[in-house]
Amino acid sequence: MNVLRPIPEVNQFESRAWRLVRDVGVRPLIVDSYRRLRHADGLTHARSLAFVTALVMIQVLVGFVGLATVVQSGNVSATVVSIVHRMVPGPAGHLLTSAVTQAHVVAARHHYAALVLGTGGALVTLTMAMAQLESGFNRLYGMTRDRPWGRRYALAALFAISVGSLIAASFICLTLGRTLLVASHDQTLAAGWDLARWPVGIALAAGAVMVLLRWMPRRRQPRLSWLALGASVAILCWALATACLGWFYALSPSYGSTYGPLAGIIALLGWCFLSSLSLLFGAAVCAQLESV
């Protein structure tokens, strides 16, 4: 593995970030950021992060649907199924909806032990994902050592709760938000929210990425103006990856019949890998801009 030199911390001229982008050029910056990602072994970190992200998604969905079934919210399963089909492309969505349906059936039979353990395990798994993400960020900035074990996982747990809440709020805005307001029978409010939920949801997702970029690396990060470009690149790459995978699965009807039951697992892991890679690439853009 190639080890990058540590990047000196920016302590002056912090208002010049966007002017520096114009001077360097966006294309050379993106190309050099990819090289930084490759030399920092970013693909390996993305694969590890994708694995735990897939586990978190399944655990959270199963726990949420199980809890909703326990409190007698009968329409939640159908709502979650429709949301997953919109948000997660192709066979990956079918795999998650199968898990949702099974969770609904199990909870309806009053078998709660596995649901409770799975929900608690989601927080543990998400903490592991945040710890893995810190390692990836540190390598991008040229640091070979992470925080001490205790501080690292304590901070990872804090990120799992705080950033996880921002991501959940973004998810609700982009998906559940309109469904909940339509049920209120206020057409004006529902129509207005249908337009506002997209910028609000994207802003929440961008805020979650900015928090990670600002506080997760083991170094003193610059002002937010230096991190805005990387956060934008991460969100854009994630949206493009999701759309491209959706088009691929829509145009390849033989994919499911070729891989059978494994199609959903492959698709879910592939989507999680591209999503993780998008986040790490956004961090690489921030690191490369600061290294200039």
Image (cartoon, rainbow, N blue to C red):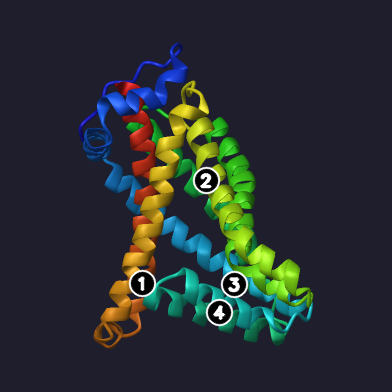
Q: Residue at x 51, y 73 (%)?
A: 84
Q: Residue at label 3?
A: 62
Q: Residue at x 72, y 79 (%)?
A: 69
Quadrant location of residue 145? top left
Question: Do residues under tags 1 and 4 come within 8 Å of each other at their CB atoms?
Answer: no
In the image, what residue type sits under mark 1? Gly
In the image, what residue type sits under mark 2? Ala
Q: Residue at x 44, y 41 (%)?
A: 231
Q: Tag 2 or tag 4, which sits nearer the N-term?
A: 4
On residue 206, the disc is 2
Residue 172 horizontal/vertical position (percent) = 63, 63
CA neighbours of label 2 inside 10 A, class few (<14), some (14 to 19), many (20+): many
Residue 130 horizontal/vertical position (percent) = 50, 44
Residue 175 vertical position relative to residue 168 in the rendered view, above or below: below
Question: Do residues under tags 3 and 2 come within 8 Å of each other at their CB atoms?
Answer: no
Question: Do residues under tags 1 and 2 come within 8 Å of each other at their CB atoms?
Answer: no
Residue 227 horizontal/vertical position (percent) = 45, 32
